[in-house]
Amino acid sequence: MTADLQFPLRDGILHAEDIPLPELADRYGTPLYVYSRAALHAAWRRYEQAIAGRDALICYGVKANSNLAVLHEFQRLGAGFDIVSGGELERILAAGASPDRVVFSGVGKQGWEIRKALAAGIKCFNVESAAELERLADIAQELGVRAPVSLRVNPDVDARTHPYISTGLKENKFGVDIRRAPELYRQALQHPGLEIVGVDCHIGSQITQIAPYLDALDKLLDLIDALATDGIALRHLDLGGGLGIRYTDETPPDPAELLEPVFAALTARGLDHLQLILEPGRSLVGNAGVLLTRVEYLKRTEARNFAIVDAAMNDLMRPALYEAWHEVVPVAPRAGTPVETYDVVGPICESGDWLARGRALPLEQGDLLAILSAGAYAFSMASQYNTRPRAAEVLVDGQDSWLVRPRETIQELYAQERIPHRP
């Protein structure tokens, strides 16, 4: 079992901190996302300790988990935020975030999103194309302000992760070719609506090795030196996020293992005056959550056995999308139940609706299962496919629990729809 210390097994029952998970399932129903406040804080402390005494800003990647309660916890801990939409900007402001600690990434920023972010006074736009740079400059000049910008450069570095979450190769849609970056910085320098403040790079997600980061860093430092010869001085270096977590047998590095050589490289190149920005998401929330689901039926066929549960691909898209592994464990296994091999599947009418394959589990109908490492890219990617209400979210702190997002009702799913009235 890879459950975090905040999801301990006590007296044969899986807990969230000090609360037995069956109690939460009975109180709030299933499927149910359960987050541990202690786990969020423990993950944050690892980054906080790694940057101690340095000019560094940790900007939580909101797309990993955007529940207001989670955002508020990180805001109280001192986090900045990495956003990728106008909607996420609204969320972090509602959670109490300070706009001057917000960086705005994403390849397709719309005009209204740019205007909203300029009005809020965010720290920086991470610009991902020449066309975006031009639009941003025009809107800023129209509003009579200067937009703080950094270019997200694509260093053509292989993050050695799943191809769907690799973002630093030249064939990816993200960022601008690092070889073209000096030209775009020179253009930005001449525009009255732009203020150059930094350089940004993000090579992927669920990265379990340090080497790709350091390869990208070397290229970024060379770029910074080249810009300095053009009279372009930067104030910060944004190395992105992407540190992985343990889903099964991975051994991802601790933040300190990454940041010690990063700070050393900055010092060696005489660039330790730059503020370092990081954009972690998954590594702050991934192992702080579980998805509870109940076995509706056990179905045995000649080919395989199926455990049909009440959660589905609309609740946890990662297995269907990436063939991702999430550990599945019985919450309160019954003594004497035989272990059999099951595919854990949901009720959605798609063959791709599976949560786990080939798992040896002691199951009976009605059993409660916990899908581990569901704090990141679970609810944030959830949908209402098959007219399925999205599940509730609960935050646990010791012996206390809060319903931080109630379960949707079926009526809410179609409340905004209209049937045309024809004569």
Image (cartoon, rainbow, N blue to C red):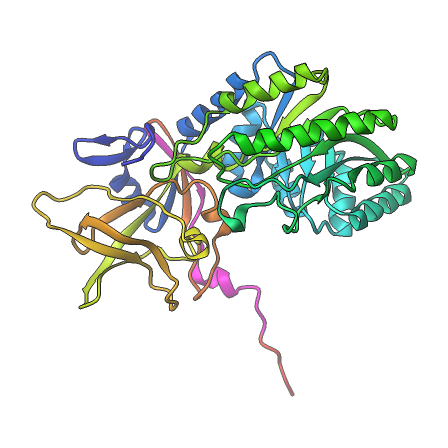
Residue plotted at (57% across, 68% down): 417
Quadrant of image for the C terminus:
bottom right
Counting from the top left corner in percent of width and height, residue 288 is at 41, 34
Viewer-side residue, 73 vs 153: 153
Q: Is residue 405 left or right of residue 154?
A: left
Counting from the top left corner in percent of width and height, residue 226 is at 80, 28
Residue 96 shows up from this direction: no
Reply above or below: 341 against 351.
above
Viewer-side residue, 282 vs 87: 282
Q: State the extent of the magenta-drawn residues as a range.
A: 399-418
Q: Is residue 404 magenta?
A: yes
Counting from the top left corner in percent of width and height, residue 311 is at 35, 55
Reply above or below: 173 against 14.
below
Residue 409 shows up from this direction: yes
Residue plotted at (53% across, 47% down): 165
Quadrant of image for the N terminus:
top left
Q: Residue furthest top?
A: 53
